[in-house]
Image (spheres, rainbow, N blue to C red):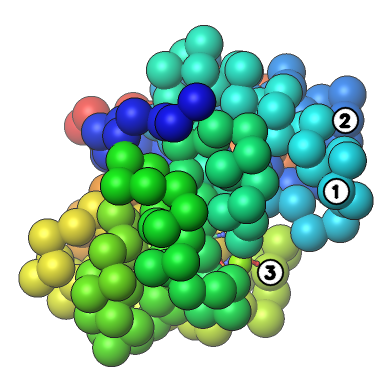
Amino acid sequence: MTPSKYSLRPGLYAITDPDLLPDKRLVPAVEAALRGGAVMVQYRDKTSGPSDRLRRASDLLSVCRNAHVPLLINDDPELAKRIGAAGAHLGQEDGELRAARDLLGPDAIIGQTCHASLDLAEAAVKSGADYLAFGRFFPSMTKPGAPAATPEILQQAQQYRLPLSAIGGITLENAPLLIAQGADLLAVIGGLFGTDDVEARARAFTELFNT
Ligand SMILES: Cc1ncc(COP(=O)(O)OP(=O)(O)O)c(N)n1
Ligand SMILES: Cc1ncsc1CCOP(=O)(O)O
Ligand SMILES: [Mg+2]
């Protein structure tokens, strides 16, 4: 089934992690994030083998479809295509965006990592990205070595008129600064799935967009 393009709403972008969410917790935790208002979900899993990735991504797709929320697959447009996910997120080392677009079609949501670079953002725009991803903005336990960005890049990237996603060490305390600088999506792993009450945490992130 070809996914139809979801509209990209501002809000919490929930990204999964296999260490924080082993099999038993994955679906319940993502369901909780969705009840709390997450507007997009990304399946990000660097450690599982192909059959586990297929099963986990498929399970998440059912949950996300029930909630009418797009599921994107990190690094792997082929897996997105295979299960009919809404799209994929690509970093700078994850293959050509145009090739992913050819594979997934015009209605897929494809996001691209731009780290802290307007040049990368411009290239992503030209390649047809649906959103631009910047960060990491704060120290991240999940990806400590990710290149650092400062919040001003979000202001500068407004010129591209695409949704802007921020990532890296985002907490309830530092999130308002990113929103004030122009982040449309807050992409959160540890600050969301590292807590026992994922639904309450997701709701608290979501409320930051409504104030
Ligand atoms: C929303 C979002 N932003 C940034 C990333 C990072 O992508 P990438 O640079 O390819 O790093 P990995 O996530 O693959 O380690 C992301 N996944 N999602
Ligand atoms: C994938 C990625 N890219 C830059 S930081 C990061 C990890 C974000 O995870 P956390 O929200 O736990 O800092
Ligand atoms: Mg990647």
Dot placed on the residue nearer the N-terminal end, 2 or 1: 2
Q: Is residue 20 above or below residue 200?
A: below
Q: Between residues 155 and 58, which one lies in front from this camera angle?
A: 58
Q: Between residues 211 and 65, which one lies in front from this camera angle?
A: 65
Q: Residue at x 19, y 57 (%)?
A: 162
Ligand 3 - quadrant of the structure image: bottom right
- Discs 2/1, front: 1
- Discs 3/2, front: 2
| Mark 3 lies on residue | 143
- How far apart are the two marked residues, 3 and 2, measured between alpha carbons? 21 Å
Left/right of residue 207 with respect to residue 61 in the rendered view:
left
Query: Is residue 178 visible in this depiction of the protein?
Result: no
| Mark 1 lies on residue | 50
**Quadrant of res 161:** bottom left
Secondary structure, mark 2, is helix
Q: Position of residue 23 (x, y in %)?
A: 88, 30
Left/right of residue 185 with respect to residue 60 in the rendered view:
left
Q: Residue at x 82, y 26 (%)?
A: 25
**Quadrant of res 108:** top left
Q: Position of residue 76 (x, y in %)?
A: 63, 56
Question: Does the closest atom of ligand 1 sit within 8 Å of the Cβ of label 1?
Answer: no
Q: Residue at x 51, y 18 (%)?
A: 65
Dot placed on the residue nearer the N-terminal end, 1 or 3: 1
Q: Between residues 54 and 168, which one lies in front from this camera angle?
A: 54
Amino acid on which disc 3 is placed = Lys
Residue 23's disc number: 2
- How far apart are the two marked residues, 1 and 3, measured between alpha carbons? 22 Å
Question: Does the closest atom of ligand 2 sit within 8 Å of the Cβ of label 3?
Answer: yes
- How far apart are the two marked residues, 2 and 1, measured between alpha carbons? 15 Å
Q: Between residues 186 and 78, which one lies in front from this camera angle?
A: 78
